[in-house]
Image (spheres, rainbow, N blue to C red):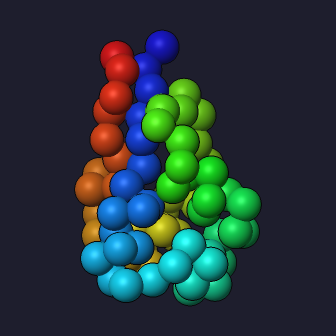
Amino acid sequence: MGQVRLKVREFAQEKGWTLKEVSERSGVIYSTVRHYARCPGMSKIDFISVQKLARTFDVMVEDMVEIVEE
């Protein structure tokens, strides 16, 4: 089963935002943002949350995701 990593931390750093600020701006709960930022690989993600994060960072969903294992 494939695994993905979300580039939350990288995009937050580019904007100069903390993970708490990302949570507040996106409407995604902080524990989810923190998990996505710290987890090196996940097999399941909440697509709605990823859409909200991509919209917040003004990037495409595809730019948020990095495949780490196929």
Residue 26 shows in this picture: no
Q: Is residue 22 rendered to the left or right of residue 58?
A: right
* Residue 54: quarter of image: bottom left
- Give residue 27's position: percent from left, percent from top: 65, 78
Q: Is residue 32 above or below residue 16?
A: above
Q: Quadrant for the C terminus, please.
A: top left
Q: Is residue 18 rendered to the left or right of residue 16?
A: right
Q: Is residue 3 above or below residue 13?
A: above
* Residue 9: quarter of image: bottom left
- Give residue 42's position: percent from left, percent from top: 53, 33
- Give residue 38's position: percent from left, percent from top: 54, 49
Which residue occupies the foreground of this view, 29 or 16? 16
| Residue sitting at x 45%, y 27% | 3
Residue 8 shows in this picture: yes
- Give residue 48's position: percent from left, percent from top: 58, 58
| Residue sitting at x 42%, y 49% | 6
* Residue 11: quarter of image: bottom left
Which residue occupies the foreground of this view, 55 or 69? 69
| Residue sitting at x 34%, y 29% | 68
Q: Is residue 57 above or below residue 41?
A: below
Tally the marks. Answer: 0
Q: Is residue 29 rendered to the left or right of residue 60?
A: right
| Residue sitting at x 72%, y 68% | 29
Q: Is residue 41 above or below residue 38?
A: above
